[in-house]
Amino acid sequence: MNGFTFYSPTKVVFGPGSCDQAGALLKEHGASRVLVLYGGGSVVRNGVLDRVTASLEKSGLSWQCVGGIQPNPRLALAQEIADNARDKGFDFLLAVGGGSVLDTMKGVSMSLACGGDIWDFFDGSRKVTAAIPMASIITLAAAGSETSDSAVLTNEALGWKKGCGTPYNRPVFAIMDPELTYTLPAHQTACGVADIMMHTLERYFSTNKTDYLTDAIAEALLRDVMEAGLLALAEPENYVARSEIMWCGSLSHNDLTGLGHPKDFSVHQLGHELSAMFDIPHGESLTIMWATWARYVCPTDPGRFAQLGRKVLNITESDDTLAAQMTINGFEAYFQRIGMAVCFSDLIGVQSDEVVADLAERCSWKGKRTVGVFRPIVREDMLALYQAANR
Ligand code: NZQ
Ligand code: ZN
């Protein structure tokens, strides 16, 4: 196990009804004036926003709500929200929604606390040095942004979806009430399960083979979220299934499943270009690429894929190469079973050679960037991967 620093400072308040503790928790953490952010309206329709504001009222807090944040959240809206909120005395930010609302909140915090353009922190020209205290009430278990150090925004003008990782992105507390996810459409539930699996798989495929506890945590999490995913799709109001998925979502992305080794994250980088170009759900941008990526890199270490299949899918085949193929086929079949796309034609249609080449150019930053550690991927590999998924 390599040396590591594990820093996951977010306080988690989990359980049915925890949403109603928002006001008390904010007050306990020093809030007096709160900017509440939400998405396209699901929290208005299902009554969650009313419950949250009632709780803020009860605790004597002042607040303002701003909605309209959409999936694959846009930089321009985050900047507009920050500019409108500047000098209005907000001392706490609260996101009520999924990863898109959380990531917008993180961008707003950067601009309010450090001043200036949010994109400067995403393109690396400035470093985040401060934050406005943040909290979240998640209504969708997927991105893990409630405890993660990252934010992902889409710069529409540049056609670029990009992440920014900094310890300042860690929210102070996260309210996790699994009942709030009962109203999710089946497809969003499945996208969330896929994303949670992918946060775990991206860390699993690394260079170390002797991080036994980390591997075991990752394998258990995968078994759990896959089973709970099927149950939640069959029974959307099954509390056990919803709570397992929700906790898996946070643990899959607070680094616990990858401690002691570098992370791969090639599939996320390949997927971000698909979401930037076609505005498709994040979870599906990943399932479109995963099996294609897995078949491409498998010869690097079939034993790793075989271990995954034996521990997670109960594969009993003793030959590593065969077991590895069965593992990749098994994960692909699971994605299809929960309704996820696994190639271009499932969602965006077969694309022209020019579009495929453009995706590889963008993902490789015109040949300047290499991604991944299990097998480092350069522009030529990215082109081959997008070509293989373009079926
Ligand atoms: O906008 P509303 O009306 O609220 O509807 C949302 C949205 O349409 C809906 N939804 C959420 N909770 C609901 C609900 N509908 C009914 N009932 C509920 N309880 O779900 C849709 C998707 O929401 P979104 O926030 O976009 O989904 P998700 O949580 O999957 O977040 C995806 C974003 O997170 C980024 C992704 O790239 C993507 O932009 N990620 C962020 C990460 C991070 N910050 O650490 C890591 C991830 O790898 C990921 O990249
Ligand atoms: Zn993700």
Image (cartoon, rainbow, N blue to C red):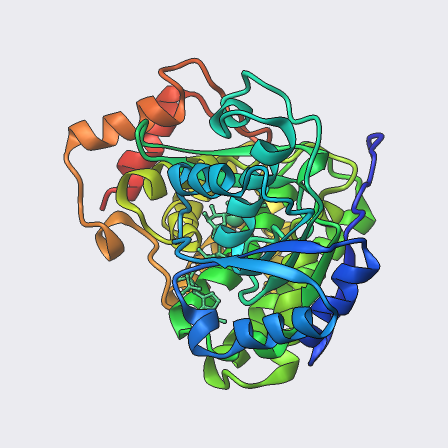
Residue 76 horizontal/vertical position (percent): 38, 37
Q: Is residue 136 above or below residue 276?
A: below
Residue 48 position within the rendered picture, expressed as x and y whole percent measured from the top left: 54, 75
Horizontal and vertical percent for residue 11? Answer: 79, 57
Quarter of the image holding residue 21?
Answer: bottom right
Specify whether 321 is left or right of 137: left
- Residue shown at the point (71%, 31%) measured from the top left: 130
Residue sitting nearer the eye, 230 or 185: 185
Q: Is residue 320 visible?
A: no
Residue 67 percent coordinates (x, y)? 44, 58
- Is 214 or 20 nearer to us in this picture? 20
| Quarter holding residue 124 | top right
**Quarter-of-image position of residue 80:** top left
Question: Which image quarter is the N terminus in?
Answer: top right
290 vs 242, nearest the viewer: 242
Name the residue: 70% across, 26% down. Answer: 129
Residue sitting at x 57%, y 63%: 141
Q: Is residue 19 left or right of residue 156?
A: right
Residue 35 in sight in this render: yes
As drawn, the residue found furthest toward the top would be 368
Q: Is 95 situated above or below 357?
A: below
